[in-house]
Image (cartoon, rainbow, N blue to C red):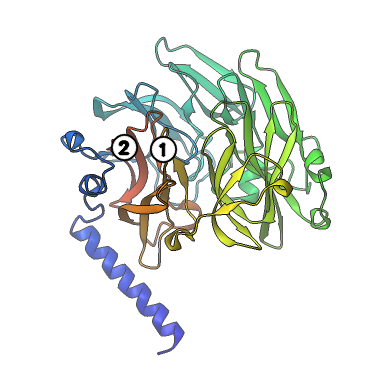
């Protein structure tokens, strides 16, 4: 049997398997039962079980895995509602930003409508503090960020679309350039003003004082290209992505990415809020990561000595450390990791396999073992820029997890209570 025939049969069988799964309502097996069996979900919470946030006419999802949608008191969960099909976004396409009360998950509480969103990262909707949320907007031909106080309804705005914050300082990048360089992650309402520049020296990572609204260029492309420069920098286009503050908010991680001929390479840096850089990774390919604490990082990356897989890093220069690779044979493929607070567990998802199956599992750092939490199906028709990854996220107290997924060709959010031993 030729390789082509094998691949064709695999595709046909995968589609039939997936069709059967949807027809029989097996899109999600019993997450609750699985969590109880592996000791992560307490039987006392079984009465509440898993909950789907959905809408009969719209898609409901949150976005990327680096943000926590749950309020600190676990009484609210942020979400987006979208009356738009699974296809590439047209200019001016609107999405609703809002939240659900945990005690009334049938009602979507609309906060605002914005066109500053993408399939992967949505509007970067996130909690600013106990009372306020912040998300990106497009107004008067420019991108910004809007703050809403949920208690009194007051609003405020920042002069740029933001990526993340530490309550007092927000970090911002050019989301239009990001979309041109990495479709599905940035915004499309205006054309990229830097499209003819390989690396716009007067742009980069901006720091915005949330109180005064004053912005400053914290780390420029010029600085990055001059930091231990490589010959390949000269003939490549450069962009930035994946900015994440450490738990204490004193430092942040980010990717400097350069592209040539459709091939991407990247570095992972950390920095303080004075722009002092630490080059943590410098071997070409690193993808998804999370902070484990204020000094340790967990990331999927490739090293000459260890190959591709999940590695543990310290927040120090790459020349001063030897990253430790997770040796578990089933953890050699990429996924989105989320460290469950105050525990040794890391929640990780996978991309769909050839049958469209995505796996959600937990890795125990102490025992070095994994447990499968669930397996879900991803439609073959919703892939590429419009794909819906699980993007697992956990509440600050480690008691609830949420994921995005597809059911009946629409995005939904699944919430599951957890009780770690």
Q: Which mark is residue 232?
A: none
Residue extending furthest toward the left: 47
Mark 1, residue position: 340
Q: Quadrant of residue 232?
A: bottom right
Q: Are marks 2 and 1 in contact (CB under 8 Å)?
A: yes
Looking at the image, residue 282 lies above or below residue 151? below
Of residues 182 and 48, which is closer to you in this image?
48
Q: Is residue 142 visible?
A: no
On screen, residue 406 versus residue 266, left or right, reads left
Asked if residue 277 lies left or right of residue 11, the reply is right
- The extreme bottom residue here reads 1
Assign a secondary structure to mark 2.
Answer: loop
Q: Say which residue appears at 68% left-offset and 56% top-offset.
A: 284
Question: Residue shown at 37%/25% (left/top)?
Answer: 110
Helix or strand or loop: what does disc 1 sit on?
A: loop
Q: Quadrant of residue 84?
A: top left
Residue 233 is situated, as x and y percent measured from the top left of the image, at 80, 53
Residue in the foreground of this view, choosing between 358 and 121: 358
Residue 76 position, x and y percent, is 34, 25
Front one among 182 and 265: 265
Residue indicated by mark 2: 420
Closest to the camera, between mark 2 and mark 1, is 2
Closer to us: 232 or 96: 232
Does label 2 or label 1 sit earlier along the sequence?
A: 1
Please tell me how many numbered marks the rendered image carries.
2
Picture coordinates of residue 308, whole percent (x, y): 57, 61
Which class describes the residues within 10 Å of circle 1: few (<14), some (14-19), or many (20+)?
many
Q: Establish if 348 lies above or below 161.
A: below
Residue 207: % across, % down:
68, 26
**Residue 362 seen from this side:** yes
């Amino acid at each position: 049997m030729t390789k082509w025939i094998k691949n064709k049969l695999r595709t046909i069988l995968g589609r039939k398997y997936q069709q059967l799964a949807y027809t029989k309502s097996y899109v999600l097996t019993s997450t609750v039962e699985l969590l109880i069996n592996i000791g992560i979900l307490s039987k006392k919470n079984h009465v509440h079980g898993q909950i789907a946030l959905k809408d009969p006419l719209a898609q409901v999802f949150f976005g990327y895995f680096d943000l926590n949608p749950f309020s600190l008191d676990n009484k609210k969960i942020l979400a987006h509602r979208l009356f738009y099909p699974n296809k590439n976004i047209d200019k001016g396409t609107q999405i609703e930003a809002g939240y659900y009360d945990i005690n009334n998950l049938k009602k979507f509480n609309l906060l605002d409508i914005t066109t500053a969103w993408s399939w992967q990262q949505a509007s970067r909707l996130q909690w600013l503090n106990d009372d306020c949320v912040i998300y990106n907007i497009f107004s008067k031909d420019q991108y910004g960020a809007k703050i809403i106080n949920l208690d009194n309804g007051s609003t405020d705005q920042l002069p740029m679309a933001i990526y993340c914050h530490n309550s007092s300082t927000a970090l911002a990048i050019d989301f239009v350039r990001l979309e041109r360089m990495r479709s599905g992650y940035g915004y499309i309402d205006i054309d990229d003003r830097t499209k003819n520049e390989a690396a716009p020296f007067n742009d980069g990572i901006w720091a915005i004082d949330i109180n005064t609204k004053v912005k400053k260029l914290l780390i420029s492309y010029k600085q990055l290209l001059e930091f231990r420069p490589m010959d390949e920098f000269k003939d490549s286009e450069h962009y930035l992505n994946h900015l994440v503050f450490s738990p204490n908010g004193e430092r942040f991680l980010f990717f400097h990415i350069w592209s040539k001929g459709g091939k991407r390479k990247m570095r992972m840096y950390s920095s303080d809020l004075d722009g002092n850089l630490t080059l943590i990774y410098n071997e070409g390919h690193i993808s998804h990561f999370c902070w484990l604490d204020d000094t340790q990082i967990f990331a999927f990356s490739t090293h000459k000595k260890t190959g591709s897989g999940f590695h543990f890093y310290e927040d120090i220069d790459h020349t001063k450390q030897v990253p430790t690779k997770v040796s578990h044979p089933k953890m050699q493929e990429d996924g989105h990791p989320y460290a469950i607070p105050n525990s040794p567990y890391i929640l990780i998802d996978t991309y769909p396999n050839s049958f469209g199956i995505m796996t959600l599992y937990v890795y125990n750092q102490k025992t070095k073992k994994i447990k499968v939490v669930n397996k879900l199906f991803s439609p073959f028709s919703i892939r590429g820029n419009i794909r819906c990854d699980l993007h697992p996220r956990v509440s600050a107290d480690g008691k609830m997890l949420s994921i995005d997924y597809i059911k009946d060709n629409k995005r939904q959010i699944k919430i599951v209570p957890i009780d770690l031993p």
